[in-house]
Image (tube, rainbow, N blue to C red):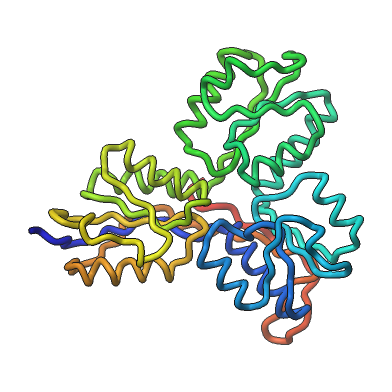
Amino acid sequence: MQKPQEILLAEPRGFCAGVDRAIEIVERALQKFGRPIYVRHEIVHNTYVVNDLKAKGAIFIEELSDVPPGATLVFSAHGVSRAVQQEAQARGFSIFDATCPLVTKVHVEVAKLAKEGYEFIMIGHKGHPEVEGTMGQLDHGIHLVEDVADVARVQPAQTEKLAVVTQTTLSVDDAAQITAAVRARFPTVREPKQQDICYATQNRQDAVKLLSPQVDVVIVVGSPTSSNSNRLRELAARLGTTAYMVDSADELRHEWFDGIARVGLTAGASAPEILVQQVIERIKALGAVSVRKMHGIEETIKFPLPKGLKIDAATGLEISEHLPETGPAGH
């Protein structure tokens, strides 16, 4: 039986700027204020990351009533509704917001257009915390559609002022299809100047499109709750390549690699590189002899930390100036 010979690594893969920033916010808060630090919802959707931060003193909660008065609270990278923000402030917590700036951008757009009298159609997955956070920016006038069929059923109160917004971690192709259906039904709908799907989601999906035709099987490192990781696996499968998603190297099954010459490997935006390296070692143990990295976009974007958490490495003192944001390479 043939064993895998080569591992082809997608580029880019793994952590994005929003995930990097969210994890750093929790780690710096722990450093500065000591344990415990409370985090509303999983900071990012990755089991390894969450367990690592738990070991360092983070406590993950869903209900704000589980946080003692005066505690330090971090909002997850997915963002929160207005109601959660107001309740957290009313309870007097010291709050650090780790919402990804690209999700915040969507929130700001919704608030701005709502003031102008717009209603919204949101493309996203029901129950996902990012969707709950974005829809929760308003108390009415925002309608969720999960697929093309939903578009036919949606009933906005008026159609003169209608705008579309999108969860940042969707399948780029699915979102384009649903947006086209929205446009067909509501020709005057306002679309975002720059699509809401984030650069990292787009780049990782583009890399899988290049990777899939060159390999016999695709392994995606990511947790079951991670939207963007699930989309990578679905995309590879849709392109005709057998694809599996694993939370860790322990979940790999040797039979997946029987009769396979080349393995494609990628990771969702919340999956750390250490897990990718452990998967590589496991596939090598099954017979793979070489690892090759594909050429891809180099991401250089970095988001500034919230005030009160910037620490100068040399002096240990807090830095107060606002760091400039750098744009993503290739965009």
Kindly give the residue lying farthest to the front in the view shown: 66
Left/right placement of residue 250 relative to residue 28 reads left
Kindly give the residue lying farthest to the bottom in the view shown: 315
Above or below — where is 108 with respect to 186?
below
At 76% from the left and 41% from the top, the residue drawn is 108
**Image spot of residue 87 (x, y percent):** 86, 52
Q: How many numbered discs, if any?
A: 0
Left/right placement of residue 312 relative to residue 247 reads right
Kindly give the residue lying farthest to the left in the view shown: 1
Instruction: Determine the image quadrant of residue 186.
Output: top right
**Image spot of residue 12 (x, y percent):** 42, 56
Camera sees residue 301: no
At 76% from the left and 45% from the top, the residue drawn is 81
At 17% from the left and 68% from the top, the residue drawn is 287
Q: Quadrant of the N terminus?
A: bottom left
**Image spot of residue 259 (x, y percent):** 13, 54
Left/right placement of residue 114 relative to residue 105 reads right
Above or below — where is 108 with respect to 247?
above
**Image spot of residue 284 (x, y percent):** 23, 70
Camera sees residue 151: yes
Above or below — where is 178 with respect to 309?
above
Instruction: Determine the image quadrant of residue 280.
Output: bottom left
At 54% from the left and 52% from the top, the residue drawn is 328
Above or below — where is 254 with respect to 175?
below
